[in-house]
Image (cartoon, grey):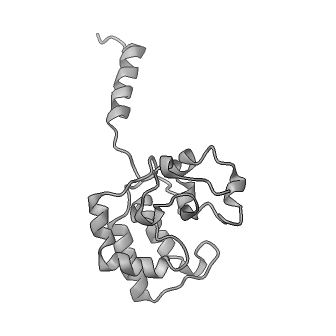
Amino acid sequence: MTRPLSLLSVLSVLLVQVAVAEPTATDAPPQPSRQESSMRASAEWKSYEAVCGSCHLAFPPNLLPASAWQKTLGSLDNHFGQNANLSSAAAAQLKGFLTAWAGQPKPNSPLRITRTNWWLKTHDRIDWAVFERANVKSAANCRACHARAERGDFRSQDAKLPR
């Protein structure tokens, strides 16, 4: 006959599982790594930065999983309300680059970085009116608060809300 597990036993196992769990693309803001430095030095990054960075921050690919990048690149004619169409060759190159460097897959990953769990958790104390200020314009304008956003560094202790 087996004995039922005590609540303490179950909680202990769950605590250990949580403690050793790897952070994923939507759980914690990724920080620059040596590997990311080599990615940023690549010709593919330079192309991505030139094409996408001409309108907005060239977001680090690991902020979203490959499935989200694929969906985003599959609908560039309506890229969050803008027509961002590219040649099929340019789109294919960007898709290959972004999916190769993408974050970990998560079920039902949003297409907007500002809708990921880690973004919502790290910005939950900021009044939404801040993102509507003329000098910020949008929640996706990371550079407005994060001076090192261009380098993929989004540490909250370095963020400064513009006045």
Quadrant in the rendering for residue 17: top left
Position of 40 relative to 19 (above/below): below
Q: Residue 76 versus residue 118: which sits nearer the camera?
A: 118
**Residue 66 seen in render:** no
**Residue 86 visible somewhere in the drawing:** yes
Spot occupied by residue 78 in the image (x, y as percentages of width and height): 60, 77
Q: Residue at x 53, y 85 (%)?
A: 85
Q: Quadrant of the C terminus?
A: bottom right
Quarter holding the N terminus?
top left
Q: Residue at x 58, y 62 (%)?
A: 144
Toward the front, the furthest residue is: 163
Estimate the x, y position of residue 98 in percent, counting from the top left: 38, 70
Task: Choose top left, top right, bottom left or bottom right for residue 130.
Answer: bottom right
57 vs 25, left or right, is: right
Does residue 7 appear to the left or right of 54 in the view shown? left
Residue 50, compared with residue 35, is above or below; it is below
Marks counted in the figure total: 0
**Residue depicted at x 34% and y 39%:** 21
Q: Residue visible at 36% across and 75% down?
A: 45
Residue 68 position within the rendered picture, expressed as x and y whole percent measured from the top left: 47, 64
In the depicted view, which residue is nearer to us: 76 or 129? Answer: 129
The answer to whether 42 is drawn above or below residue 143 in the figure is: below
**In the picture provided, is 48 more to the left or to the right than 115?**
left
91 relative position to 114: left or right: left
- Provide residue 129's location: percent of width, then percent of height: 72, 55
